[in-house]
Amino acid sequence: MRISPLVLLTLIFTSLLAQANDSVIAEVQALLQAGKPDEALNAVAKLDAPAKGQPLVQHLTGLAHYQKGDYQQAVEFLTPSFAQTPIGSSQRIQAAHLLGMSHYFLGHIAQALPFLSEIAGSSLDTPETQYLRGVCQLQAQQVDEARITFSRMFSVPADSAASRLINAQMMVRQQLEELAVDELQKALALDPKLPQARFLLGELAIYKS
């Protein structure tokens, strides 16, 4: 079948445009790896509208805003990208990490928790993210889940007296004293000789009186 000159020109133009977009995306990735988010955003501006709507480009744009500390903008770009990215992919895991951190820094505890939970056990699940996830779980009254998270953070058995003591200490930091008392009593039931638990219980009793 013979292709008309107009169709041929359109195909050539589309191919060249795609190549140009790919080149810009590679430039954006390199700039972000170099820690240059402003330059990366300037590069994104060179892309055409359809390219800017691609999940990868939205992801990179969100990452640039995250690097700038503009967490609200990061959320706006990362949220649609996250929804379109395959579960288990490295891009989705990074997006979950960035969304969890961004929501936490914005004070959106409830929104942060699902994203921080998704990265559990991944290479991005650092002591920092474990701590933030545990805090979110405590704020959501997910006591057992928080204990498991903190036990991973401190490398202690999740069903041990030590893990319950740590959980109680974190509860006190979050001003969840009533929950802490119950957790300390469970810790002492497992290890009656745990001095830190008795000391903290005494402090809480004095605080309440």
Image (cartoon, rainbow, N blue to C red):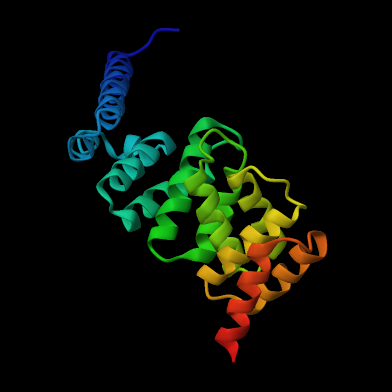
Residue furthest bottom in the image: 209
Q: Is residue 23 above or below residue 109?
A: above
Give the camera-side residue of 72 and 139.
Answer: 139
Numbered disc total:
0
Give the camera-side residue of 135 and 74.
Answer: 135
Residue furthest top in the image: 1
Give the camera-side residue of 208 and 112.
Answer: 208
Say left or right for 106 vs 183. Answer: left
Quadrant where the image shows the C terminus: bottom right
Residue 105 visible in the snapshot = yes
Q: For the point 51% across and 44% down, which residue is it? A: 127
Quadrant where the image shows the N terminus: top left
Q: Is residue 78 above or below residue 15?
A: below
**Quadrant of the image occupied by residue 12:** top left
**x, y percent for residue 191:** 78, 59
Q: Is residue 112 above or below residue 197?
A: above
**x, y percent for residue 106:** 38, 63
